[in-house]
């Protein structure tokens, strides 16, 4: 195999010939039509008879790339006579097209067909490396872009899942009496393509298009392979090394502030104030050659002058002075350089950024940033930032690539009283990136969920690997910006052209078990709610509502969120009916009707929490005089609390429709572990849907 | 034609035979394959030769429904000999299948094909009546439900628009070198189907499947027609009559409260208090036989006893007493009966509801409800409801079918200080429904936008007709609940089966120019924002942002909302660049970069407002010390105000990322006509998108 590839590269070709492609497929057990090379009309006839008619004839010439244009392809030759004549015709056409073309002969190939036309391929994605693609052929993939991607290599189960992941999945199972595809054989072929490109990084793109997937197997009728240079592989630090570095950064025993200042309005002053007022208990060393002390703490001329070990250095000096100070910090042995200054890659100063990265590498220092607001880690009362302090402890860690989004995180946290373990700006991501942070937060007992805003990933595979470690234990929420931007990528294959947009990110993040938030506000709400919600044990969602109108909208939301309304068994239906008026509707939604007293809410919700067949509750509240908002809130909080104390842990979300008192009721419910929103039927259910997406990815549902 | 249909019905058939279907198509100029009926093998041969080979042979028998099962179909007969033999084979098969079957002969039909297989059909929708469907054939319509609907009859332009309305629209234009369809011919065929079912209400369903749409025309290869009884046509009041009634209801000179009470907590007491405290200036007549006066107003034993004319009677008595009181109110000549009581259809009491409707009809009284919270109309200071009063005057009228949603409207209005012209509960919609309300609000100068929550429409065509009158003048926002419920409709045709879900509503509401809100919160936000926003003059949207991160998310949101980022021409790019730092990014989004002073926002926003090529602005604000939130808010409000005073009316929406001060800044901006939201990049753009959807439907964009 390597010979074939090297030969092509040596000849300056990036596209392999059809026989070369076929040879490679054969080595990986990927079925291709029977074929052979004929160098005379008689040989062509003999081959055709051996393979079985009808056949296809194709010119084989390293100098003729567009065979069809050259009249070098004849399809569906049905007799020996047609094959003989066809051979001569093709040769004549080829000579007429290019008299100087080297001609190796004519390929005689079995004409395959029948079953479903699908496309299987692989590309080299700039973020994720080798990525396998699958879709139905023809118009479905062409016009509707109905295609799905996975990291290569992939397991047989992953390959099988791809078959169900396209919108037209049903087609493969046979519709309108059509023959179903052999799913096992097709998945097997996809898996082999994954292994093939993983084993041979020099294969940049591969198209098997079409593959004929019938009930008898899967045959790649056409193979197109593009080869090139082996893509460079970034080096990766070991998990232990990363964890050691990150632990020193998030739980530092001491912090130096380079550029600390007494002058209000200066970043070096804000950082000092936030560290001190935030309640950080480690040592703080202001570095400023011009002041003897800063905010009551002795200042040092340089970090070198500090007579103690230092874990973290916060940089609050102009970009021009960073390199020198970083060299000193490196010599001092700091673990983390919190690089607040801007003026690096984001303003075009790529050299300056490369320079500080090189200095940091040399000394084993990790840079967070540059061009960031800093970071918060509440378990250590650590506010190493120039923003206002934030100290509401909780269990979600949030990170953002953009300062603006970081500020939105802060404002949202404050206004919703969202408890956080950390808020981290990653800015230009010159060094520390999301996989480093996942590695730390994944094992951090203070963090139960992680939410990340990102615009790109430096190392998609590193991210996926880190995410896969974390997801079984805690949810990762990702807001991937640049969702709708169309990639303008030059691609040499069909698969390459299809992989040019956000779909690759979407599929692979899902494959990694990440919960993708569609927008900023969704990310914030998921981050706020997910850590507060028990994990559901199964897929049975029940709606209990005091307003039929909310019930209908909540049902819509349930379907939108990919959740399943439980089919209520007769005994359970009867049990619910015992509590609701005769004109109320059992079934699901359970409509207890408006104007019911608190006891009706209590009885039905308690039944929902205790019956083991129910896994999650969605409540629809309607403001009435009989059961005012705060009465509802206190009642639900109490019942949910009582049942949780008995071991009945189920997620409960609520939509409150009513006058403004419902806002206070929602706050109260949130504080008591019931996810509640006013004036929306969508948000509570969307958040429940996010929890379910994670629970499924983590394999926690029965 | 009527003969054919009547013959079928007389014979107890609902499905027409193929020749019958073809005859009907021919009358409407819908091309079908050449064909004829042969009663001997020789006739079949002659016909086939005349029509042109190849042909299809099909048994024609009123007793054989499933022709294929009976061996009654032979496809692709290529020679005269094959046709002769085929005739005999089919006859033998048919006799073997059912010896007693009446056999009219064998249909000889041209074998058509080539071009694109599409489906054109029509169904009788319970809400909208005759509805035309179009989709691509085969797997696209089967598995992906890629189909679109329109009310019949439809114009040629509407039919052409249908071709572009399916996801796979591109296919018809020819992809991968395929032949493009003759769009004109295909649209023409669709239009004819619309006319056909409109002219003949007895045609319940029609399937032309497949239609072969090639560059040479469109031919319906197979016709299936289901006939039945002419659907009953509801009677409709004239616009003038409705307007007269609604005007008396919304601008009453006098109101009687039947069941008025002095006892706190009673509905009749709440209504009285809200009428009086709300500031209603007309006469109020409490009706209560047991009290001499209610809240200081003289009470009457019955409405009959009131010595003045009465426009509106609010019912606050139990359901059992409604009929008697309504009879009296009818005799008194009231225009509107505001039917707050529950206990009618919603609890299964359909007879009781039918009874009061009959009484109302008899007297020409319009019933609002029953089972409602009442209604508000702020221009008259009118709070005819048992809820709390709401008096913030504004220009959006909201209606809800559910009391719960009504309460959510009230709470949301109060907390956001949303100005409203009206809030109306329609409840069971025994009488007054959305078209009546559209007729009033459409011409009401106090109302500039209408938002409606609805679960069904009693008369879909009436709604569409009313909406079409209104949309050119003001937006209609609809939250249609029950979106995702799958219709479980028995259907005799393919088109019928496809029309079973929410897609019909969606397409036809869009056709009517209605802006559909995906959820409750969206409806509320659209209602709040749309009346405050100037109408854009064109599609050129420009993003100006202080945070690159927000710019990326705002761009995502722009694409999601169906908006177009303007391509900035070089001179305009240069003009923007003059105001932003060299490392900022012009283009679109225009990234002015963080840390810029207020003047940078001012200069760029003013340029955006004054340059005539720009039609709408999306602002991304990033909280900094240099330009704090309220400085930004006051600045933008001032610049927008100044430019609007100069005649530069453009919608401006803003996303504010920052600490909690951005909330106050958003409130300030909203009050000054700039639509602004904190902690979300999606919502401001979604609201702008809604305005655009309306502006396009109203034909207001250049």
Image (cartoon, coloured by chain):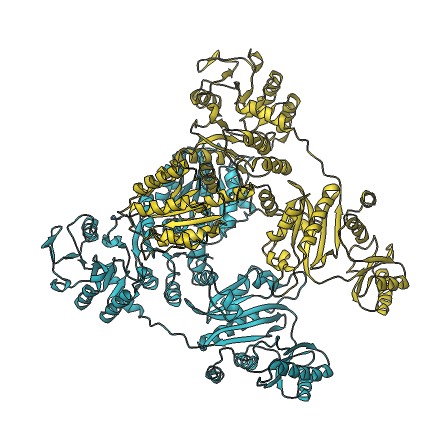
Chain colours: A cyan, B yellow
Q: Position of residue B620 (x, y in %)?
A: 37, 48
Using the image, determine if residue B138 lies above or below residue B15: below
- Tell me the residue at 56%/31% (across/down): B437
In the depicted view, which residue is nearer to us: A12 or B244? A12
Residue B347 seen anywhere in this rendered image of the structure: no
User: Splitting the image into 4 quarters, where does residue B203 fall?
Assistant: top right
Q: Position of residue A1 (x, y in %)?
A: 49, 83
Residue A460 seen anywhere in this rendered image of the structure: yes
Which residue is the extreme one toward the front?
B571
Q: How many marks?
A: 0
Using the image, determine if residue B118 lies above or below residue B300: below
Using the image, determine if residue B631 lies above or below residue A184: above
Q: Position of residue B192 (x, y in %)?
A: 72, 47
Q: Position of residue B350 (x, y in %)?
A: 62, 31
Which residue is the extreme one toward the left?
A292
Please give left or right for residue A209 compared with residue A227 in the image.
Answer: right
User: Splitting the image into 4 quarters, where does residue A244 fall?
Assistant: bottom left
User: Splitting the image into 4 quarters, where does residue A628 fall?
Assistant: top left
In the depicted view, which residue is nearer to us: A473 or A192? A192
Please give left or right for residue B659 compared with residue B468 in the image.
Answer: left
In the depicted view, which residue is nearer to us: A396 or B182? B182
């Amino acid at each position: 195999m390597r010979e074939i590839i090297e030969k092509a590269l040596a000849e300056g070709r990036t596209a392999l010939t059809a026989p070369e492609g076929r040879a490679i497929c054969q080595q990986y057990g990927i079925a291709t039509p029977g074929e052979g090379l004929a160098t005379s009309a008689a040989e062509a006839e003999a081959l055709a008879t051996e393979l079985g008619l009808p056949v296809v004839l194709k010119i084989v010439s390293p100098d003729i790339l567009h065979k069809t244009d050259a009249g070098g392809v004849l399809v569906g030759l049905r007799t020996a006579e047609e094959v003989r004549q066809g051979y001569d015709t093709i040769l004549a056409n080829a000579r007429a097209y290019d008299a100087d073309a080297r001609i190796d002969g004519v390929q005689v190939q079995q004409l395959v067909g029948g079953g479903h036309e699908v496309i299987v391929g692989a590309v080299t994605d700039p973020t994720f490396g080798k990525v396998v693609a699958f879709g139905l052929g023809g118009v479905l993939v062409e016009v509707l872009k109905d295609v799905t991607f996975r990291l290569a290599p992939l397991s047989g189960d992953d390959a099988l899942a791809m078959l169900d992941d396209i919108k037209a999945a049903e087609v493969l199972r046979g519709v309108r009496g059509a023959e179903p595809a052999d799913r096992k054989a097709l998945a097997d072929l996809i898996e082999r393509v994954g292994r093939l490109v993983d084993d041979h990084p020099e294969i940049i793109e591969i198209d098997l298009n079409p593959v004929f997937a019938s009930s008898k197997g899967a045959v790649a009728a056409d193979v197109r392979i593009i080869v090139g240079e082996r893509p460079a592989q970034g080096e990766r630090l070991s998990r232990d090394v990363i964890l050691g570095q990150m632990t020193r950064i998030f739980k530092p025993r001491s912090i130096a502030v380079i550029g600390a200042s007494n002058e209000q309005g200066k970043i070096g002053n804000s950082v000092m104030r936030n560290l001190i007022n935030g309640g950080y208990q480690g040592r703080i060393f202001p570095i400023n050659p011009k002041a003897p002390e800063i905010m009551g703490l002795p200042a040092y001329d340089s970090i070198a002058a500090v007579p103690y070990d230092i874990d973290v250095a916060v940089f609050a000096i102009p970009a021009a002075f960073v390199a020198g100070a970083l060299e000193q910090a490196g010599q001092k042995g700091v673990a983390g350089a919190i690089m607040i200054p801007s003026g690096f890659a984001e303003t075009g100063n790529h050299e300056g950024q490369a320079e500080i990265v090189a200095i940091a590498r040399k000394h084993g220092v990790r840079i967070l940033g540059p061009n960031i607001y800093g970071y918060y880690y509440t378990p250590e009362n650590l506010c190493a930032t120039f923003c206002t302090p934030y100290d509401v402890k909780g269990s979600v860690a949030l990170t953002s690539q953009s300062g603006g989004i970081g500020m939105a995180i802060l404002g949202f946290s404050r206004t919703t009283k969202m408890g956080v373990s950390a808020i981290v700006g990653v800015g230009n991501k010159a060094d520390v990136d999301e996989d480093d942070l996942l590695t730390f937060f994944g094992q951090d007992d203070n963090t139960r969920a992680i939410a990340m805003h990102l615009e790109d990933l430096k190392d998609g595979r590193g991210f996926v690997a880190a995410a896969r470690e974390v997801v079984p234990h805690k949810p990762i929420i990702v807001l991937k910006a640049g969702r709708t931007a169309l990639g303008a990528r030059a691609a040499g294959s069909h698969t390459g052209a299809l992989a040019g947009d956000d779909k690759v990110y979407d599929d692979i993040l899902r494959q990694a078990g990440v919960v993708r938030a569609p927008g900023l506000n969704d990310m914030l709400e998921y981050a706020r709610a997910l850590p507060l919600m028990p994990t559901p044990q199964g897929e049975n969602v029940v709606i209990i509502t005091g307003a039929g109108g909310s019930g209908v909208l909540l049902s819509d939301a349930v379907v939108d969120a990919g959740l399943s309304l439980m089919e209520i068994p007769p005994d359970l239906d009867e049990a619910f009916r015992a509590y609701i008026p005769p004109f109320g509707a059992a079934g699901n939604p359970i409509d207890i009707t408006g104007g019911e007293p608190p006891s009706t809410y209590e009885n039905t919700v308690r039944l929902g929490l205790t019956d083991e067949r129910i896994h999650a509750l969605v409540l629809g509240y309607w403001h009435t005089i009989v059961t005012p908002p705060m009465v509802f809130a206190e009642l639900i909080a109490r019942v949910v609390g009582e049942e949780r104390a008995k071991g009945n842990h189920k997620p409960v979300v609520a939509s409150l429709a009513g006058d403004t008192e419902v806002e206070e009721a929602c706050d109260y419910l949130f504080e008591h572990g019931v996810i509640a929103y006013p004036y929306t039927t969508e948000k509570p259910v969307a958040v429940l849907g996010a929890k379910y997406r994670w629970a499924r990815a983590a394999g926690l549902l029965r």
